Image (cartoon, coloured by chain):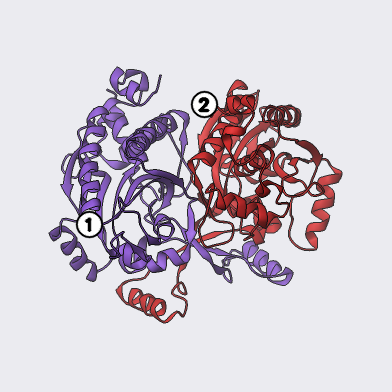
Chain colours: A purple, B red
Amino acid sequence: MGDALRADTPAGFGAALVAEGLLVPMGVAGLYGRDARLEAIIEGVDRLVLRAGMADGAASLRFPPTIPRDVLERSDYLRSFPHLTGTVHGFTGGEHEHAELLERLEQGTGWWRGLQATDVVLTPAACYPVYPVLAGTLPRAGRLVDVCSQVFRREPSDDPTRMQAFRMHEQVCAGNAEQCLAHRDRWVERGLALLHALEVPGKVRPANDPFFGRGGKVQKAMQREQALKFEFVIPICSEDKPTAIGSCNYHMDHFGVAFDIKAADGQVAHSACVGFGLERIALALFKRHGLDLSGWPREVRDVLALG
Amino acid sequence: MGDALRADTPAGFGAALVAEGLLVPMGVAGLYGRDARLEAIIEGVDRLVLRAGMADGAASLRFPPTIPRDVLERSDYLRSFPHLTGTVHGFTGGEHEHAELLERLEQGTGWWRGLQATDVVLTPAACYPVYPVLAGTLPRAGRLVDVCSQVFRREPSDDPTRMQAFRMHEQVCAGNAEQCLAHRDRWVERGLALLHALEVPGKVRPANDPFFGRGGKVQKAMQREQALKFEFVIPICSEDKPTAIGSCNYHMDHFGVAFDIKAADGQVAHSACVGFGLERIALALFKRHGLDLSGWPREVRDVLALG
């Protein structure tokens, strides 16, 4: 194991990944290119999560990294996580406004002033575009949906485990409370089994979302008290502060109310989602098994189909 | 062949794809979810382009759907395509500003007012983040880079072949003029061979980019006169106006100047890129072979590894 892997600061670990060419810095904190080795690992993990969902009969859907603004508004995301939001703005002017834009660009006075908010925002979590699709009355068994997408969180950081843009693979359940709790609990076991197969030291623990501001403290406390969220954590850059690489969330009727989803019995549907951060899992694998894939345990290479 | 496939208007074809469940409307024109069948086709096409690039010794890199704003500014994109740009804005306020945001949300008076432009924009073409990485002096043979990413074009449309968010797979060459022209011309042949293998009626023709405004007319004319751009086109919704599903572009020293890339001889590097719109190719396949994949020619299923 080289010095790089003993780097126990996020910046040191990031520098080692960049030096090895696995991550390519893009000049903005938290944005990186990925090389083919990193992509192969991510595809391997992605396939494992997909197959587990298929075994349950989940329908697989893939959404773009941008979703309607309306979905963010209805979901209450803006109440809980305004600081992580990314909205998309565009140019709607004519030739005159274009000339002005170019003049501001030339003079460095903010060419983007005057751009208009579009009806599109960046996807904050892979499951968000699923809920509008589920509107209406669910079948008796509920619905399971497998989704994976590029997501955006506006939190620039030099910690490579805290990217602004990364991939999240989620398994969503909508139905009655029992179905959703069973889904979440089944995936707690599955997630641990997946991490065990990857030979990384993962654990599960109660958790809360990073709700914004002082008011957010109450939301955090309630989420923990009601045991709505569990996280899978792995020590990557710190033994004391392990990194969350995924989570299992029971939303109660939050999205059911917001998106008019009814269970088969006519009650407002409940929902649960289980999400895995693919880049973080890949980084945990590098930290554990080294930056040279040829030195990884045969069993881990096999389960990821790395050849 | 069902009525759906005789639909010769974009809206009719889109409705047929939605009715079959291949595309899932998201409530904003040009944003769609994709089901597993559509994804399998896209992955198949993606693999074909990747393998051809690998055979040339291209390095494969994958970038997120967001890139530094600086890349857009240096590339001259804002001069040519302001109308297609998407910038990312975020919330930088505290609790007081958050309360105001939520009040505007409640009252429907534009909660996004007061958001600040970030240093991040949506990726307009898969090749853009490559050029900053190539800064410096290239090896004698030049550099080949294989990239694929989610891209964004702000052009809402009900035509399913004109999405706001879609995947673009590109093969980029940077080096001297001869290397770049050879790359482009090699891929003209390869692209036609790929379309032939997919048994879709593709052709190649001189083309120009959709430069903005009256000034853009000159750019369009120059681009055609200098034979810088060729498009692969396939009739999808119209025989008279076939749809571009990819293009082969010679940039001369445009990106070399913008991003300080030098050829091995010390001259400003030239570049070329060849891009394929993966969703458009998938839609061309559905139009040609039908919405039921089981009825597709065996050879086409094999080349896409659809099983």
For the N terminus of chain A, the image quarter is: top left
Residue B268 tag number: none
Circle 2: residue type? Gly
> Residue lying furthest right in this view?
B225
Residue at figure coordinates x 61%, y 30% from the top left: B49
For the C terminus of chain A, the image quarter is: top left
How many residues crowd around disc 2 within 10 Å: few (fewer than 14), some, or many (20 or more)?
A: few
Between A135 and B26, the residue placed more toward the observer is A135
Q: How much space separates mark 2 and mark 1, taking CA atoms?
A: 38 Å
Residue at figure coordinates x 57%, y 39% from the top left: B130
Marked residue chain, label 1: A
Q: Is residue A99 visible?
A: yes
Q: Are marks 2 and 1 in contact (CB under 8 Å)?
A: no
> Residue lying furthest left in this view?
A225
* Residue denoted by label 2: B307
Where B67 sits versus A285, above or below?
below
Q: Point out residue A100 in the picture as x, y percentages from the top left corner.
A: 67, 70
Q: Point out residue B154 in the picture as x, y percentages from the top left corner.
A: 61, 59
Residue at figure coordinates x 43%, y 74% from the top left: B111
Residue A177 tag number: 1
Residue at figure coordinates x 52%, y 66% from the top left: A119
Circle 1: residue type? Ala
